[in-house]
Image (tube, rainbow, N blue to C red):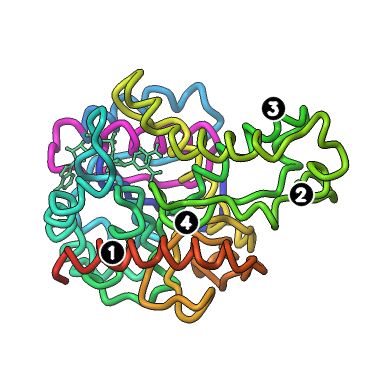
């Protein structure tokens, strides 16, 4: 049993929220989990179902359905509420509907006296995270989105398969929008201590630049492929949310490509985008600024321009 209380409030007990909650329980990440949903029966049923697994888990966790007052002493409020994409729909198509949903969520969270960290998964995630920053008035280091953490995990998995190397030893990132304009800064991708550019250069007969481009495209299209096959994606993002939660509770100062507020980094400002950040107990401690090539910087500019335009469309 921990000495310290570690309380998470999850808002939105759908596929993504409950995949997160189930992984939290299995990894014994916190000792209190409150579930909020506009559909209170659903949240209550989910709390019951999780509680019935406690005896099998080694976790000592209090899990219950609640209303917004519970946010008052929470450490992290995780937002997974809102609509998700239908097959063929893109993430920005959700913007207006999810902005309306967030207006009904962020106000009561703040009114409760909450003073912890917001962690957002709802799409389009970079813009929705910016929406939370504006609606809450919180300092940006305490408002984080999942950004490109999931895309980065997809990239590491595919590169691990391609090079036949443990993905944990693949250090490569997807950055920018969690969406169409995201990209892989290949100049910064490493397998162990060797850069991917060097591997492709030295072993061009086996490992090809065109294969890297194909992997980047597969990462970008992964969500659509999964949604076409099974309607929605949730296990990967659930695990990504747990990874970020652990970095916060453990004060790990881990480098994760969360969506964070750019204030001059990469020449960008007034925008949330996925970039490698140092994540610890106080949220985003800072960005680890990558040394991008001119071509990569122009991709970053494009991605941030798109995100700023989407944010403008929220009229906040
Ligand atoms: N950031 C990422 O990498 C990923 C993000 N997502 C996004 O996560 C979001 C959730 O997806 P799913 O869980 O599959 O959807 P879902 O439809 O299964 O769950 C959404 C939940 O939100 C609740 N909800 C709706 N309005 C609410 C309100 N005003 N207050 C409280 N709760 C409310 C619903 O009752 C429902 O339980 C979507 O926007 C989806 O696009 C999904 C996968 C990956
Ligand atoms: C749905 C979504 O954003 C994803 O799986 O990447």
Disc on the earlier residue, 1 or 2: 1
Q: Which residue is mark 2?
A: 197
Helix or strand or loop: what does disc 4 sit on?
loop
Q: Earlier in the sequence, mark 2 or mark 4?
A: 4
User: Within 10 angstroms of label 3, few (less than 14), some, or many (20 or more) residues?
Assistant: few
67 relative to 52 in the view: left or right: left
Q: Quadrant of the C terminus?
A: bottom left
Position of 41 with respect to 54 (left or right) is left
Of circles 1 and 2, which is in front?
Answer: 2
Front position among marks 1 and 4: 1
List the residue tagged with mark 4.
5
Of labels 1 and 4, earlier in sequence is 4
Q: Which residue is mark 1?
A: 72
Is residue 28 found inside the magenta-colored segment of the image?
A: yes
Q: Secondary structure at mark 2?
A: helix
Magenta range is 13-42
Question: Is 215 above or below relative to 66?
Answer: above
In x, y percent, where is residue 200? Answer: 79, 42
Closer to the camera, 42 or 213?
Answer: 213
Q: Which residue is depicted at the point 58% across and 50% down?
A: 184
Question: Which mark is first along the chain, 3 or 2?
Answer: 3
Query: Which-is-in-front pick, marks 2 and 3?
Result: 2
Q: Secondary structure at mark 3?
A: helix
Dot 3 beta carbon under 8 Å from ligand 2: no
In the picture, the quarter occupied by the N terminus is: top right
The answer to whether mark 3 and mark 1 are in CB contact below 8 A is no
* Residue to which mark 3 is pinned: 161
Name above or below for residue 274 compared with residue 208: below
Give yes or no for contact between labels 2 and 4 (Cβ–Cβ under 8 Å).
no
Give the residue at x 14% y 52%. 101
Residue in the image at 18% along x and 69% along y: 111
């Amino acid at each position: 049993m921990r000495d310290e209380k570690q309380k998470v409030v999850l808002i939105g007990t759908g596929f993504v929220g409950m995949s997160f909650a189930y992984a939290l329980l299995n990894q014994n990440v916190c000792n209190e989990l409150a579930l909020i949903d506009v559909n209170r029966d659903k949240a209550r049923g989910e709390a019951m179902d999780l509680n019935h697994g406690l005896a099998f888990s080694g976790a000592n966790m209090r899990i219950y359905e609640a209303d917004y007052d519970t946010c008052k002493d929470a450490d992290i409020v995780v937002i997974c509420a809102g609509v998700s994409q239908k097959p063929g729909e893109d993430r920005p198509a959700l913007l207006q509907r999810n902005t309306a949903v967030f207006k009904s969520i962020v106000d009561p969270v703040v009114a409760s006296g909450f003073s912890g960290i917001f962690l957002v998964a709802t799409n389009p995630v970079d813009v929705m995270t910016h929406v939370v920053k504006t609606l809450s008035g919180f300092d940006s280091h305490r408002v984080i989105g999942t950004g490109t953490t999931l895309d980065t995990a997809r990239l590491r998995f595919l590169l691990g398969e391609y090079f036949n190397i443990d993905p944990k030893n693949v250090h490569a990132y997807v950055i920018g929008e969690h969406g169409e304009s995201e990209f892989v800064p290949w100049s910064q991708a490493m397998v162990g201590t060797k850069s991917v550019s060097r591997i492709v250069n030295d072993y061009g007969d086996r490992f090809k630049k065109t294969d890297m481009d194909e992997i980047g495209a597969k990462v970008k299209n992964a969500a659509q492929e999964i949604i076409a096959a099974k309607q929605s994606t949730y296990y990967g993002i659930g695990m990504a949310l747990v990874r970020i939660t652990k970095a916060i509770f453990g004060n790990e100062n881990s480098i994760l490509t969360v969506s964070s507020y750019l204030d001059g980094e990469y020449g960008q400002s007034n925008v949330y985008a996925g970039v490698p950040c140092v994540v610890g107990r106080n949220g985003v401690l800072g960005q680890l600024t990558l040394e991008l090539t001119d071509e990569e910087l122009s991709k970053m500019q494009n991605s941030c321009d798109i995100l700023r335009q989407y944010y403008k469309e929220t009229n906040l």
